[in-house]
Amino acid sequence: MSAKSFPKLHNAMWPGLVGKGDGPDQEPPISLERMLELTAAANVNGQKFDGIDYFLFFPHTDPNASDSELNRIADLIASHGFSVGSLVAPVWGGTVGDSAMGDAAAREKFLSAVKMACRIAGVFEKHGIRKYGVIRIDSAEFGVEKWRQNKKANTQAIVDTFKEAAIIAKDHGQRLAAEGEICWAGMHSWRDMLDVLEGVGMPEALGFQADLAHTYLYLMGYNAPEYALLHEGYTEAEFYAAYEKMTDMLRPWTIDFHVAQNDGHVHGAGAHDKTGKHCPADDPNGKLDIVRCSGYWLKDAQARGIQHICWDGCMFPNAMLETPKTWNQILDTMIRVRDTHGW
């Protein structure tokens, strides 16, 4: 067992949902109960996962669920010895929300999803199962083509929506984290992400969620070549110089952190636009030294209120999710991150 107890080690529940469905070539969703069982079974020298991060939508959760139903879910999670950390607000079209740069009706839907997430967070906190973590959002605008038609106005619309969302969160005692991912308009590069964060200018209520897999593609300028910090064929020295540059700019805003691996490719499943491909922790094609790269984001983590880290295996195939070795390898990697950078 590690001598360090923070950050707490969480597993995400949404890999059982994102990109899954009943459409052609789609795998079926994995239930919350099964995702909890798979997470609870992981064990590395007596160390287990401490908790989960949780997606607030069907089939895992009805975002309009009653307090009693939410308390039942909290009891189920607690029965595995887990706490709940960060929550994902259902901000996308097709869930509760809609585009943060859309018309007034779309933006009102977006804000209603944030309100729902804040309410659920409060129920979980009153229950006692949630003591830390953020509420995750993004612009809910798939792809960057529409955004590019009028970058300035569309970025301003996202900023305005996020400001309103941040005020809602602050009033509920919550913090929002905007996920940096190349598929979300206005958040698809490190530069555009910074423009949004600085435009909102409410670091106490809205910060950044860094994911190792997604931010690798920030370096490569996948959806914004003008902001590429690296190019194919880079050396190790060039990589870490670029990595330090990126993390120095985004780390001050970072209040939630996903441990992950990336093989340099993009991947989409179902209705989910192409984005950074999450790979197994031990993927031989992985581009990242996970432990070393995590240190750039976790420097001064306590000062930013980070109390846990989460593994994101978004869009892993179901067979991979159902394999115990997958989770033990992930847990082992996260323990090494904590041993090296924790407290």
Image (cartoon, grey):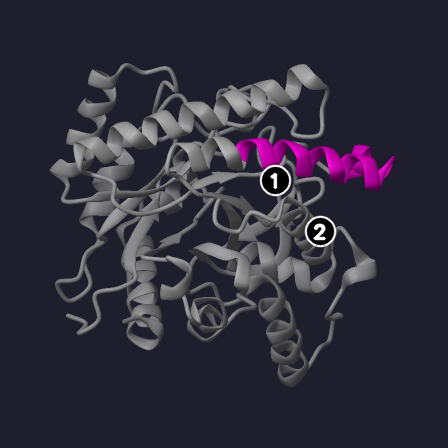
Over which residues does the magenta segment extend?
A: 144-165
Q: Which mark is residue 268?
A: 1
**Image x and y of residue 136, in percent:** 47, 40
Please tell me whether mark 1 or mark 2 is closer to you in this view.
2
In depth, the one of 187 and 37 nearer the eye is 187
Residue 25 sits above or below residue 237 on the image: above
Residue at 38% of width from left, 42% of height from top?
319
Q: Quadrant of residue 251?
A: bottom right
Which residue is label 2 attached to?
A: 195
Say which amino acid is labelled 2. Answer: Asp
**Where does residue 154 sit, x and y in percent of width and height?**
78, 35
From what the image shows, is residue 299 above or below residue 216? below
Q: Residues within 10 Å of mark 1 (few under 14, many from 20)?
A: some
Q: Which quadrant is home to the N terminus?
A: bottom left
The total of numbered circles placed on residues is: 2
**Relative to 176, 145 lies left or right:** right
Q: Position of residue 195 (x, y in %)?
A: 71, 51
Question: Residue 309 at what x, y percent from top left?
Answer: 36, 56
Residue 239 visible in the displayed image: yes
